[in-house]
Amino acid sequence: MSAPFSFLRSLRFSQCARATTRANAPKRPFSIARAFRQRENPQPVDSPEFVSILDGPPKIVRKGRRHGPGLIILAIIPVTAFALGSWQVQRLGWKSELIAKFEDRLVRDPLPLPPIIDPDAIHEFDFRRVVASGVFRHDQEMLIGPRMRDGQDGYMVVTPLERKDASTILVNRGWISKKHRDQRTRPDGLPKGEVMVEGLLREPWKKNMFTPENRPDKGEFYFPDVKQMAELTGSQPVWVEATAEPEFMQMIDYERRGIPFGRAAEVNLRNNHAQYIFTWYGLSLATSIMLWMVIKKPTTEIARRANRASRH
């Protein structure tokens, strides 16, 4: 027999011998202690509901840090909202004191308006009841609008009042309907001779960013620019709002005849700071709860397994 055939025969014999040895080898005897240890320390793979990372659908799992920069932004929101709520508490106290001060001025007797008024001193007399007499300069009348009242479009009538001492002030006489824009439609609303005006001394108004600029060359006024109107009419920059409290039927008659009727003698400043306090503090509380839930949210099983796999 040649050497190659002898080598192949011996190789096959050795393979058959190893296979026979493995088949006839005694099995590992069952151990109660080993089974008990498996029951005491079960492994995830022992559970029939176990799903391997490789068997499940692919997911993006954050490894290492649980939270990113978004947590910082979420933490800033409740702090900012709480600060704004505290600021509104201060604003509420300031506005309440201001309204109380103005209401105190309203209950005082009307003050005769002096001939010359210092514009810088008007701030100390804002909402102060005053009286003045003189003659209306209807030829220099200015209409500010549009202004809505009870759902109707109209204008505020501003007329210079020329007094006996030759000084002139601006008087907001009140509201008229749009249909009486032309003076010829309201002869009853153009009093002649000397008149007595009682009203509130007010600070110059400030327009908001949405109000267009006045166009005095075309007779269009969208807000009361006291300094501008005073220069146009040669008046002092003094603004008086005429007050009146006509009865309902009298108001209807005034509106029909085009007679301006003034505002009520009351403080009409808005005071919504209590609502802002509730809004900001409520937002701070809600976002604080959300932040706590995000921080306390437990790590998912997949993330824990991924972190363990990365450490090993």
Image: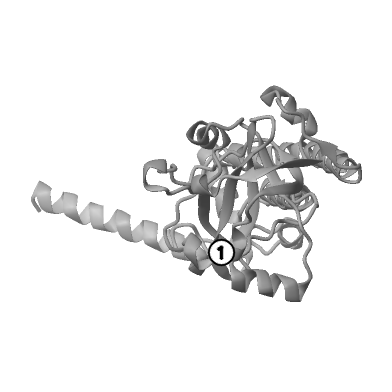
Q: Quadrant of residue 96?
A: top right
Residue 11 percent location from the top left of the image: 24, 52
Please report the residue visible at 61 percent of the width from the left and 30 percent of the height from the top. 236
- 193, above or below 91, in the image: below
Left or right: residue 131 versus residue 143 is right
Q: How many marks?
A: 1
Crowding near the residue tagged with mark 1, few <14, some 14–19, many ≥20 C-alpha atoms within 10 Å: few
Left or right: residue 92 versus residue 69 is right
Residue 170 visible in the shown view: yes
* Residue at the front extreme, as displayed: 193
Residue 280 visible in the shown view: no
- 153, above or below 85, in the image: below
Q: Secondary structure at mark 1?
A: helix
According to the image, what is the colour scheme of the structure? Answer: one colour
Please report the residue visible at 50 percent of the width from the left and 44 percent of the height from the top. 140
The disc labelled 1 sits on which kind of residue?
Answer: Pro
Residue 101 percent location from the top left of the image: 87, 38
Left or right: residue 64 versus residue 278 is left
Residue 245 percent location from the top left of the image: 79, 62
Residue 171 percent location from the top left of the image: 64, 44
Please report the residue visible at 80 percent of the width from the left and 52 percent of the height from the top. 265
Q: Which residue is mark 1?
A: 187
Along the line of sight, the residue nearer the viewer: 203 or 54 = 203
Left or right: residue 250 versus residue 216 is right
Please report the residue visible at 63 percent of the width from the left and 56 percent of the height from the top. 191
Along the line of sight, the residue nearer the viewer: 291 or 279 = 279
Q: Quadrant of residue 97?
A: top right
